Image (cartoon, rainbow, N blue to C red):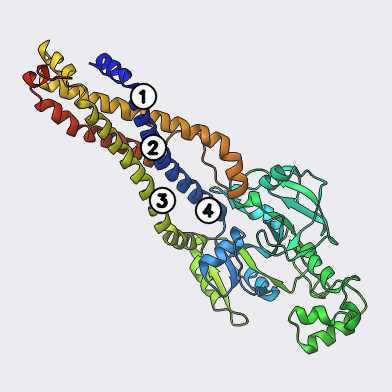
């Protein structure tokens, strides 16, 4: 029976090939969409693992998560250094890492932070960050870059880079007067970390201080540091105090001359504003009490975000888009199955003499019915194999590009449980769909086949 079915398909190989390609495209899209969805979801979850809370200015939890963890959007006006110190001093807090945002390097986010970031940050279920080359920045002129940035632009330890003000591809002000030297390159993580540039808080502040009061500033001659201070939102009294403290020293509008003692980790630098704080707790059971303490902080309106909860909110927002993509892929799969049914049905009239001859040599109607079903299963199975092979080839070819541009890693590994279910659903649908043309053959009589005229 199997040999007969294969020979029958080979005799109609042109039409069968088109049908196989249609089903292959269906499987490619259905499994590909599912794999993209899983890759995006895993990448998002991995990027936020190891962080118990994210504190930022009062705002939406999803917006704070996207801005601080993935470098997309903004986190509002920022928070004061006193708020950071309050959070770091809470007895339940094990570590706290400040985060400053607002600059980019060739479209990739620049993060101002401390060397403690590389000690405490975790990804992909608790893995620590490691360096493929070099080490963390030791001074304000050092920078640590993610693996994708290094690979895309060919950066190495010792490369000089220049950042710009603005988010994403938009650069309002190129800070070419304050270059950084790459001191370390992180190992690949498969998360947003691969697409970020990290500099010290002091180096981050230096960018804007140099721009505000540098020698080339046409407004510097008007009133020394006053113009830059007004732009930074200082009051008249603060500007006057700043002028008395050092009117003639350019480039220090922000707080790197703060006399207060800072934690040793920050090398004495206390910026006026930061955008967020990553928080790790001694005991995760205290997360709600710490969240309440941050949200109720009287000196400044803050929001403490639980990353996992924010991720669930994010997926609830994107769920409709995921469903729509899967529905479109399923519609293509359905169209492929319908095309196979049409092909088999259209060939029945041509094959009526073939079926009549089979009946005349002893084949029962049930055996011919089984032959039609077998042919459909073979077409569907071959289409599935071709579709999966095509997806594997495309994944291998495009993964470097997708990882560099979007942080997506399709992978060429075995099928996941849900993907296996989708493939089996296509196979079952192809088998069930063959019942209709097979039933027509079953009803054909021997006399009707022998009396058929060309």
Q: Quadrant of residue 24?
A: top left
> Residue under circle 4?
44
Is residue 410 among what the camera can see? yes
Q: Residue 325 bears which disc, if any?
A: 3
Q: Position of residue 442 (x, y in %)?
A: 12, 26
Q: Nearer the viewer, mark 3 or mark 4?
A: 3
Q: Earlier in the sequence, mark 3 or mark 1?
A: 1
Q: Nearer the viewer, mark 1 or mark 4?
A: 1
The one nearer the camera, 41 or 56, is: 41
Q: Residue 180 bears which disc, if any?
A: none
User: In the drawing, does residue 300 fall left or right of residue 431?
Assistant: right
**Label 2 neighbour load within 10 Å: few <14, some 14-19, many 20+:** many
The local secondary structure at tag 2 comes to helix
Q: How many marks?
A: 4
Q: Position of residue 113 (x, y in %)?
A: 71, 61
> Residue under circle 2?
27
Q: Position of residue 247 (x, y in %)?
A: 90, 80
Q: Are marks 3 and 2 in contact (CB under 8 Å)?
A: no
Residue at image location 68% in from the left, 53% down from the top: 118
> Residue under circle 1?
14
Q: Position of residue 144 (x, y in %)?
A: 74, 51
The one nearer the camera, 257 or 148, is: 148
Q: CA distance from mark 1 to mark 2?
A: 20 Å
* Residue furthest front in the image: 454
The one nearer the camera, 179 or 282, is: 179
Up-down: is 424 above or below 273?
A: above
Q: Quadrant of residue 437?
A: top left
């Amino acid at each position: 029976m199997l040999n007969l079915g294969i020979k029958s398909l080979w005799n109609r190989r042109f039409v069968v090939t088109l049908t196989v390609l249609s089903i292959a495209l269906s499987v490619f899209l259905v499994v590909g969409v599912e794999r993209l969805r899983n890759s995006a979801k895993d990448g998002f979850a991995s990027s936020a693992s190891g962080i118990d809370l994210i504190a930022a200015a009062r705002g939406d939890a999803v917006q704070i998560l996207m801005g601080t963890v993935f470098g997309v959007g903004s986190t509002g006006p920022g928070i004061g250094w006193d708020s950071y110190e309050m959070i770091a001093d809470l007895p339940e807090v094990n570590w706290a890492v400040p985060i400053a945002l607002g600059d980019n390097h060739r479209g990739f986010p620049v993060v101002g932070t401390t060397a403690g970031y590389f000690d405490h940050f975790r990804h992909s279920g608790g893995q620590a960050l490691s360096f493929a080359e070099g080490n963390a920045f030791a001074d304000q002129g050092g920078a640590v870059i993610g693996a994708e940035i290094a690979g895309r632009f060919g950066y190495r330890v010792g490369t000089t880079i220049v950042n710009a003000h603005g988010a994403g591809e938009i650069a309002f002000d190129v800070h070419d007067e304050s270059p950084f030297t790459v001191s370390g390159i992180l190992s690949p993580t498969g998360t947003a970390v691969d697409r970020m540039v990290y500099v010290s808080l002091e180096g981050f502040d230096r960018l804007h201080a140099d721009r505000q009061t540098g020698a080339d500033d046409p407004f510097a001659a008007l009133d020394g540091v006053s113009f830059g201070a007004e732009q930074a939102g200082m009051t008249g009294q603060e500007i006057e105090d700043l002028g008395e403290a050092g009117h003639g020293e350019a480039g220090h509008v922000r707080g790197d001359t703060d006399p207060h003692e800072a934690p040793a980790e920050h090398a004495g630098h206390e910026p006026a504003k930061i955008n967020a704080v990553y928080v790790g707790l001694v005991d995760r059971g205290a997360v709600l009490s710490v969240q309440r303490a941050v949200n109720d902080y009287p000196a400044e309106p803050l929001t403490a975000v639980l990353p996992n909860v924010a991720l669930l909110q994010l997926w609830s927002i994107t769920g409709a888009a995921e469903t729509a993509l899967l529905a479109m892929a399923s519609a293509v799969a359905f169209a492929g199955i319908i095309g196979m049914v049409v092909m088999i049905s259209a060939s029945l009239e041509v094959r009526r003499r073939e079926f009549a001859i089979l009946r005349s040599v002893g084949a029962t109607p049930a055996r011919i019915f089984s032959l039609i079903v077998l042919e459909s299963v073979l077409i569907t199975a071959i289409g599935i194999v071709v579709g999966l092979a095509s997806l594997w080839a495309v994944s291998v070819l495009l993964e470097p590009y997708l990882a560099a541009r979007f942080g997506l890693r399709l992978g060429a590994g075995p099928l996941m449980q849900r993907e296996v279910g989708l493939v089996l659903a296509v196979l079952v649908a192809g088998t069930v769909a063959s019942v209709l043309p097979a039933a027509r053959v079953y009803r054909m009589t021997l006399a009707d086949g022998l009396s058929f005229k060309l």
